[in-house]
Image: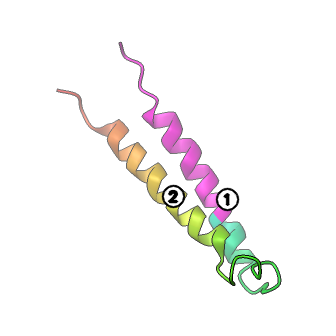
C-alpha cells in the first residue's frame, strides 16, 4: 500500500510549531504569564520541539523506499 502519513504529519507539526514559537517569542517578556510554569517560556520550548519533530517527519517522508 502507498499510504504514507509522514508528510501531512510533518506539515501539521511544522505549522503549529511555527505558530507556537512566534507566540512564545512575542510573549517572552510577560513574566506573569509564565509564573505558573516556574518562569519557563513553555510556548517557545514546545514550539521548537514541534518544529524539530515536523522537520524529522518531513525528512523521513522524502527518503526513497528501497
Rendered-image quadrant of the C terminus: top left
Please tell me whether residue 27 belongs to the stretch shown in magenta: no
Residue 39 x, y percent position in the rendering:
69, 84
Q: Nearer the viewer, residue 35 or 41?
A: 35
Res 44 → quadrant: bottom right
Tell whether 24 sits left or right of 3: right
Tell whether 57 sits left or right of 66: right
Residue at x 60% of width, y 50% of height = 15
Distance from disc 2 to disc 1, alpha carbons, whole Å, reads 10 Å
Label 2: state its secondary structure. helix
**Residue with the most extreme right position:** 32
For mark 1, what is the residue? 19
Rendered-image quadrant of the N terminus: top left
Residue at x 39% of width, y 50% of height = 56
Q: Is residue 52 above or below residue 57?
A: below
Residue at x 41% of width, y 44% of height = 58
**Residue with the most extreme top position:** 1
Res 12 → quadrant: top right
Residue 14 x, y percent position in the rendering:
54, 51
CA neighbours of label 1 inside 10 A, class few (<14), some (14 to 19), many (20+): some
Residue at x 66% of width, y 77% of height = 41
The span picked out in magenta is: 1-20
Which numbered disc flags the more N-terminal residue, 2 or 1? 1
Residue 6 x, y percent position in the rendering:
43, 35
Main SS, magenta residues: helix
Residue 34 x, y percent position in the rendering:
75, 79
Label 1: state its secondary structure. helix
Q: Is residue 52 above or below residue 39?
A: above
Please tell me whether residue 7 belongs to the stretch shown in magenta: yes
For mark 2, what is the residue? 51
Q: Nearer the viewer, residue 47 or 63?
A: 47
Please give the label number shown on residue 3: none
Amino acid at each position: 500500500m502507498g499510504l504514507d502519513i509522514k508528510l501531512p504529519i510533518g506539515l501539521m507539526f511544522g505549522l503549529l510549531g511555527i505558530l507556537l514559537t512566534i507566540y512564545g517569542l512575542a510573549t517572552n517578556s510577560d513574566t506573569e504569564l509564565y509564573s505558573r510554569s516556574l518562569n519557563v517560556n513553555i510556548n517557545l520550548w514546545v514550539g521548537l520541539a514541534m518544529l524539530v519533530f515536523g522537520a524529522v517527519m518531513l525528512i523521513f517522508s522524502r527518503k526513497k523506499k528501497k
